[in-house]
């Protein structure tokens, strides 16, 4: 520890005591008063300075140290002054001051060196600045040394260097492309623009002055880019990156929105923001980039360190675009279909209205027709009643031939006419849906037998025969006896009518599955294949002869309607010159009941 004496006094006394300890022969040239007067001001000031200060005479003798040097050497001035300068420091430094003195003697004006002073295990580092001490005539009489303790600075620098290495390592290995920029010059330019009255930077960069981007980009300085950025942009150095950017901006000022967004954000004073932009990252290679901009802490004012990191979102964007396209296409199609649907609905509505009025008109016409037919039938049948009545009376009175035969002919014709009129009326009723069945359980075998017996005598007129074959287990059917009789008689009558003299008519009935099939077979001319499709339609006659005997084509149409009402079917098997087989199928009672139940459940 140094003694706590007044600094000035202490320094002067130290100067003197140092003088006494030195070899007299060597110091003859040194005028101590001179030294004192020359260095006193320095000494006085040096006591106030934080640096260690030492004065050495021309013979390496320490003639003065200040308080700070005493502290840094860890010795009192008494312990140091008067010693050889190299005895003040331990270790490696020893000869350096000698060298400095030698260099000064050789004419160097100033020497600066960094020295390490190992004190125990504690190393201190000093920056030593030495200046020569000359008399007026320029003779060197000593040197003054300033010791600046830079140990902490060096340690900090070392730490900073280590941190820098660590930072570089981290920066380089961040798994996204990242670039460090210096925006400080650009910041000044933003400020200038603001002072010139620019307040809306977005408008400025996009509309008012798009070329401003070029100016800003020229002031921009990429500092470093990590390996991912280098790979991503296909570049090696920040300089190359800058050159590449400028080239692209010159060529594509309006297209590259990314840099504009960056400048707008920073110019508006944002320190952390991001944006998506379509950017040309290499020549002709455009990508959607999600860019994050981040100003380094402490650089908010200067924008000296700004980081830009990028994520390539091209695939996501493209998928989104595709999705949008699909959605709009879907929307378009839905709109199209909706319009079509609306149109169809309108049309259906129109058609429905037309159909309603047509149906009403049709119903009106049908009613009119039915009414007319009824009146017609009435008008036709009314005169037949007295005719038939009169014939009946006459035939009872007159027995003489040929008058009787003539009467019978008239009677036959009148009855046939009456039947025809009835058929016509039935067909009309069937067409208008007003023909109804009187249903009951019908023993079809019994019905056929009765009809067989009824027609048999009448066939003798054409010397025709009839036979009936019915299987014994024929089930009942649910039907209208009268109407079924009408159908079967009609078919037998046709066979009678169209078959030659002496021919045979065969009536058969058998069960087939859930149906009963009734057949009426004859040896007549048959019906050509091409005519069969129309046969069961009204007013169809195979031959062109349409006199009443040959028929008007009402009978089969009526048969078809009546069998249809029985939920059955009528069809024909026939070939020209080989007779005809008319077949009727009607469901058995059980089947009819079952169908009834099914129908009622629907
Ligand atoms: P119509 O009441 O005039 O007899 P149908 O409807 O009963 O009329 O018969 C239609 C036509 O079918 C007849 O005009 C006739 O030419 C033909 N036809 C009907 N049955 C037979 C049959 N058994 N043999 C030959 N032709 C027949």
Image (cartoon, helix red, strand yellow):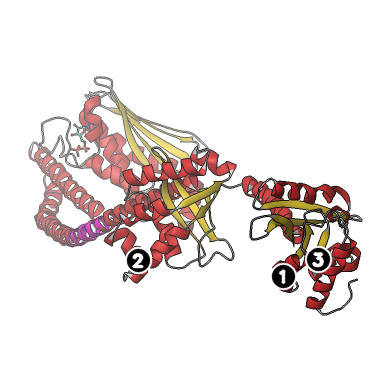
In the rendered image, residue 166, in percent from the top left (x then y), is placed at: 70, 50
**What residue does disc 1 label?**
37
In the rendered image, residue 99, in percent from the top left (x then y), is placed at: 77, 46
Q: In the displayed structure, would residue 578 be above or below residue 131?
A: above
* Front residue (pair 465, 394): 465
Q: Which of the 4 image quadrants contains residue 153?
A: bottom right
Instruction: Find out whether residue 349 is within the magenta segment.
Output: yes
State yes or no: discs 3 and 1 in contact (Cβ < 8 Å).
Answer: no
**What residue does disc 3 label?**
65
Within 10 Å of disc 2 (Cα), the crowding (few <14, some 14-19, many 20+) is some
Q: Earlier in the sequence, mark 3 or mark 1?
A: 1
* Front residue (pair 402, 252): 252
Magenta span covers which residues?
343-357
Q: Which label belongs to residue 140?
A: none
State yes or no: discs 3 and 2 in contact (Cβ < 8 Å).
Answer: no
Which residue sits furthest top?
577
Tell me which secondary structure the magenta stretch mostly adopts. helix
Q: Secondary structure at mark 1?
A: helix
Q: In the displayed structure, would residue 331 be above or below residue 588?
A: below
**What residue does disc 2 label?**
193
Mark 1 and mark 2: Cα distance apart in space: 61 Å
């Amino acid at each position: 520890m140094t003694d706590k004496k007044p600094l000035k006094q202490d320094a002067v006394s130290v100067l003197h005591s140092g003088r006494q300890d030195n070899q007299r022969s060597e110091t003859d040239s040194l005028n101590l008063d001179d030294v004192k007067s020359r260095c006193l001001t320095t000494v006085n000031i040096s006591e106030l300075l934080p640096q260690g200060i030492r004065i050495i005479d021309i013979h390496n003798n320490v003639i003065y140290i200040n308080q700070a040097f005493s502290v840094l050497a860890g010795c009192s001035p008494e312990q140091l002054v008067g010693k050889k300068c190299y005895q003040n420091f331990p270790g490696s430094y020893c000869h350096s001051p000698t060298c400095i003195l030698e260099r000064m003697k050789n004419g160097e004006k100033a020497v600066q060196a960094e020295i390490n002073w190992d004190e125990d295990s504690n190393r201190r580092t000093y920056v030593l600045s030495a200046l020569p001490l000359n008399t007026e005539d320029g003779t060197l009489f000593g040197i003054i040394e300033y010791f600046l303790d830079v140990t902490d600075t060096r340690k900090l620098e070392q730490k900073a260097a280590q941190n820098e290495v660590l930072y570089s390592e981290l920066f380089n290995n961040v798994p996204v492309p990242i670039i460090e920029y210096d925006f400080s010059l650009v910041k000044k330019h933003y400020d200038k623009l603001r002072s010139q009255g620019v307040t809306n930077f977005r408008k400025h960069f996009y509309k008012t002055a798009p070329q401003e981007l070029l100016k800003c980009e020229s002031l921009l300085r990429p500092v470093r880019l990590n390996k991912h950025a280098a790979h991503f942009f296909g570049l090696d150095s920040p300089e190359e990156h800058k050159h590449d950017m400028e080239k692209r901006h010159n060529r594509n000022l309006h297209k590259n929105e990314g840099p504009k967004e960056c400048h707008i954000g920073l110019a508006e004073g944002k320190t952390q923001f991001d944006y998506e932009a379509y950017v040309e990252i290499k020549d002709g290679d455009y990508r959607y980039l999600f860019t994050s901009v981040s100003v380094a802490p402490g650089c908010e004012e200067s924008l000296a360190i700004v980081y830009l990191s990028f994520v390539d979102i091209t695939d996501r964007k493209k998928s989104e675009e595709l999705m949008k396209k699909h959605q709009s296409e879907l929307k378009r199609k839905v709109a199209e279909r909706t319009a079509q649907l609306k149109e169809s609905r309108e049309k259906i509505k129109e058609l429905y209205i037309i159909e309603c009025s047509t149906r009403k008109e049709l119903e009106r016409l049908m009613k009119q027709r039915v009414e007319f037919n009824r009146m017609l039938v009435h008008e036709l049948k009314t005169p037949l009643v007295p005719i038939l009545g009169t014939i009946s009376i006459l035939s009872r009175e007159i027995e003489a031939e040929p008058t009787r035969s003539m009467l019978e002919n008239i009677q036959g014709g009148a009855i046939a006419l009456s039947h025809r009129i009835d058929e016509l009326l039935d067909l009309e009723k069937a067409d208008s849906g007003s023909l109804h069945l009187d249903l009951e359980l019908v023993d079809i075998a019994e019905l056929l037998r009765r009809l067989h017996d009824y027609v048999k005598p009448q066939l003798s007129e054409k010397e025709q025969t009839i036979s009936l074959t019915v299987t014994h287990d024929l089930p009942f059917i649910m039907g209208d006896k009268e109407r079924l009789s009408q159908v079967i008689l009609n078919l037998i009558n046709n066979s009678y009518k169209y078959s030659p003299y002496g021919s045979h008519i065969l009536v058969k009935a058998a069960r087939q599955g859930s149906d009963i099939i009734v057949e009426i077979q004859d040896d007549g001319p048959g019906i050509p294949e091409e005519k069969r499709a129309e046969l069961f339609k009204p007013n169809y006659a195979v031959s062109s002869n349409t006199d009443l005997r040959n028929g008007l084509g009402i009978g089969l149409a009526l048969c078809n309607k009546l069998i249809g009402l029985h939920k059955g079917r009528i069809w024909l098997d026939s070939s020209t010159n080989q007779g005809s087989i008319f077949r009727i199928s009607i469901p058995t009672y059980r089947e009819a009941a079952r169908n009834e139940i099914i129908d009622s459940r629907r």
